[in-house]
Amino acid sequence: MKPALFTVQDLHVREGNFQLCDIGFTLEESQYLVILGPTGCGKSMLLETLAGLRYPKGGKMFLRGREITLLAPESRKFGFAYQDSLLFPFLNVKDNILFAVRSHKNRLESSIMKRVDELTEAMRITHLLDRYPQFLSGGEKQRVSLARALLSKPPLLLLDEPLSSLDPQTRSSIKELLRTIHDSEELGIIHVTHDFNEALQLGTHLLVMDQGRILRQGKVEDVFFRPSSKYLADFFMEENILQGRIEWRNGQAWFRQAGSPVEFGPLKRKKIPEKYPDEVALLIHAGDLSLSRANGYEESKANNWYGLIERVVNFSTHLEVVCSGNGKYKAILSNNEWKELDLQSGSRVRISVDVEDLHILPD
Amino acid sequence: MALEQNNRTTFRDNSRSLLIGCFWLLFIFLVLFILLLIGGLLNYANWETVKTVLRQEEFHFALFFTLWTSVLATGLAALFALPAAYILSRYKIPGKAFVDTLLDIPIVLPPLVSGIALLILFGPVLGGFLTALGLDIVFSSSGVVIAQWFIATPYAVRIMKQAFDGIDPRMENIARTLGYTPGNVFGKVTLPLAKNGIINGLIMTWTRTIGEFGATAMLAGITRMKTETLSVAIFLNMSMGDLKFAISTAIVMLLMALVSLITLKFFLKQEVIRF
C-alpha cells in the first residue's frame, strides 16, 4: 500500500508554559487540510513544528513513509508562507522568488527560469518582477510569497493564516489562487486559520484545535455540519442550538425543548449517541430551517412552530432572518425565497425543520 | 454643565499648549547651544595658524596614529560585538540579564577607572605572561588600541543588538524552509537586514574610539610622538600652554565627527529611500 503523504503521530511540543499534546493526523496525497482554532490555540506553533522550525519533545513525523522528525527545515524543503508575506526587502520580486535556488546554485538553468515564468504567470505577477516588496500591495506580496514557496516544487505547502491580513476582494482572489495551486501543483496543503469560512471554502479535510489539543478531525462536511459537541457547534457559531432532553415514546425518541411545547422527532436512531446525559443539545443549521407564511393561529406541532420575524440582515448573496418564538432562531434564505414570502420585520411566520436535519450533540 | 465641561477642556488645552511651548523653548535652546559651541570654536581659531599646525610633524603623527588605532579598534570591536549582539538578541541564555549588565560596565564606568582596571590587568596580573609572549601592552601603541576597543565595544554591542532585535525571526525561518542552513541564513538574510544598524554601530564606535582619552592615558600613557592620539595631543599642548595647536587639533576632530555623522545620515537616508 502506498504510504500517506504526511503522517504525524503523538506530537508533543513545549514552549514556556504552553504545550501541544497528542497531535496526530494523516494527510493523503493532494489533500487540503485546514487547521482551525481560536487565536492562541497553538496552530502556528504546530505549523512551525511540521516545517522543522521547532523541535518536538515527543512524537514522530513521516513524509511518504520516511521518518523526518529530526530533519532540519532546509532538508525538508516544505513550502511555507506566513500571513504577512515576509518578503526580503533587500531583494526585488524576481530575486525573492529565486531565493530558494540561490542557496545551492549560482547559475540559473533554463528549467528554473521556465518554472519562474510558469509560476509568475499563474500568480499574475509577471509585471512586478523588478519591483521591491515595499512597492507592492498586500495581495501582490502574498502572491509573490506563494510563488517563492512553490519554486522548488515542495511536496507539502504550509500556510500560516495566509488570508487574514488581506481586504475582502483580495482575499477572494487569493482563495481562488490557492484552489488553482492545489489542483495544478498536485501537492498537499496544510492551511492554518481561525476563520471557518476559509475552512469550508478551501479544505477537503478539517482539524479543529483548542488549547494545544485536537478537538476533532475529519472531512470538512463531517466536522463542520455534524459537530460532535456543543463546544464545537458554538465554535462554528451555530446559533440554533436548543437545550432539552430526549424522551422515548413507543420505541421512538423525541427531543423536547426545555420550557417549550415544541418537540422534534422522531429522531433517527443512528443520530442518537449511545450514551447521553439527561440534558442534551439539539443543533439545527440555519440553512435547514424553512419559513412560510402563517395562515391563522394553528397549534405548534412536531418540528413546526410559529414565531415573529425580529430582524432581517441583507447580505449580497443571501438573507439572514432572525425569528423569535419559543427561543430565537436564525434562518438563511435566498433572495428569491424571501421575495416569494413577501414578509417583513414583525410578521408572524411558520418555522419548520425536516427530521433529517436534526442533530443531537453528544456532549 | 456643558459650559463647565467646555471650560475644563479649554483649561486642559491651555496647559497642554503651555507644556508644548516649554518643550519648544528647551529644544531651541539646546540646538542654539550646540551651534554656539561650534561657532565659538571656529570663530576663535586663526585659520593661518590652523594651516601651520596642519603642516607640523606632531600633528601628522597624532592624526595618522589616531586613524590607524581607531580603525583597528573599531574592527576588533565589530569582531566581538557582532556575535555578542546576535547571541544576546536571539538566544535565551542563563543569566542573560547579568551578562547584559556586565557588557554595559565600560559604558557606565568613568574612562579613568576603566583605564586603571586595564592597567592592573595588563600590568601586574598578565604583564609577565604577555611580556614572555613578546606582547607589550602597557605604555605602547597596542595599549591605545586595547583601551579604545574596551571603551567602544559595548556601544557597538548595544547598537548592533538593536539592529538584530528589529529583524522578525520569521524572516530567518522562511529562509530555512527555502533550503538555507543557519550559517547561510545569517549571511544571506540576517546581515543584509541588519546592515543599516551595523553600519550605524560601526560609525558610532569609530567616533567613540577617536575621542577616547581617559582609559588610553591610563593604559598607554601620554607620550609625545609615541602614544599621542589627537585627544592626547590636545591635552599635552593645552597643559604646556600651546593653545593654538590644541584649538587647531580640536577643530580637525570636530570636522572629522561632523563628516562621519553626515556620511552616516546620508547613507541611511539613501537606504530608507531604497527600502
Image (tube, coloured by chain):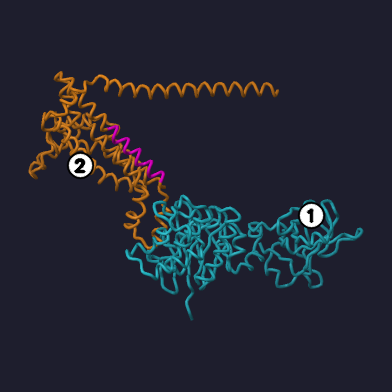
- Determine the residue positioned at 33% across, 65% down: A105
Q: Identify by letter the chain in cyan.
A: A
Q: Amino acid at mark 1?
A: Cys
Label 1: which residue?
A323
For label 1, the SS is strand
Percent x, y of residue A100: 39, 62
Residue B269 located within the stretch drawn in magenta? yes
Label 2: which residue?
B72
The residue range painted magenta reads B257-273
Percent x, y of residue A78: 44, 65
Compared across the picture, whether B171 is left or right of B183 comes to: right
Using the image, name the chain to which the residue with label 2 belongs.
B
Compared across the picture, whether B256 is left or right of A94 comes to: left
Percent x, y of residue A66: 41, 73
Q: Amino acid at mark 2?
A: Leu
Q: Quadrant of residue B271?
A: top left
Residue B265 located within the stretch drawn in magenta? yes
Q: Identify by letter the chain in orange.
A: B
